[in-house]
Image (cartoon, helix red, strand yellow):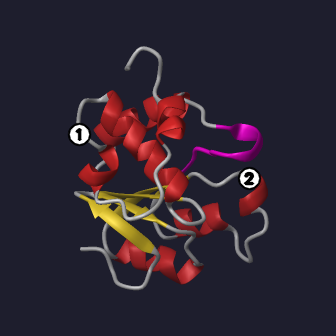
Amino acid sequence: MAPEGNNIVCRHGRIWLAGQPMDTDIRAWADAGVKLVINSRTPEEIAQLPFDHAAEVKACGMKYVEMPIGGPYGANPIHTAELAHLLETEPGNIVLHCRTGTRSAHLYAAHLLATGQAGGNPFETMGWPGPADPSMVRALIPANSA
């Protein structure tokens, strides 16, 4: 069960989509059974935080992975393939986050589409309440999946 007040925007099974956490949120995630944190913010954005994000995640016993989306990093479909591998091999709850959760939701939507789990609309499937950009999702789908 996801703890309250920790920037979780929506949950889809063991996948939690979140906005930028503070260090207290990261500890709450670990306490709630999260095993993997996937950060979709750019390194430039993370450098502006008042704490060492990756170090805090690791200090709480979770695995940390960066899949930057946006700015000079664009929408790289290799992240969707990497996400599929992580979802197959990593146990426990997984948080995908960026500043507001939107980029992470688009990455997860691309995964749902690429793996045939999207139903009619990947954003409805995951219960995403925020903005949805189909062109960003298409850009994130690996060529061999669509």
The dot on residue 43 is 2
- Decide if residue 50 is on the left or right side of residue 10: right
Helix or strand or loop: what does disc 2 sit on? Answer: helix
Residue 36 higher or lower than 135, as above or below: below
- Decide if residue 76 is on the left or right side of residue 132: right
How far apart marks 1 and 2 lie (CA) works out to 34 Å
Residue 124: x and y in percent read 28, 53
Residue at the limit of the structure toward the top, as seen here: 144
Which residue lies at the image location 33% right of the left edge and 80% below the top edge?
3
Q: Nearer the viewer, mark 1 or mark 2?
A: 1
- The amino acid sitting under disc 1 is Gly
Q: Which residue is labeled 1 in the image?
A: 120
Decide whether residue 65 is among the magenta residues: yes
Q: Nearer the viewer, residue 46 or 74?
A: 74
- The amino acid sitting under disc 2 is Pro
Which residue lies at the image location 69% right of the left edge and 68% below the top edge?
52
Of pointers 1 and 2, the one earlier in the residue sequence: 2
- Image quadrant holding the N terminus, namely bottom left
Task: Let me know if residue 89 appears in the view.
Answer: no
Residue 12: x and y in percent read 26, 57
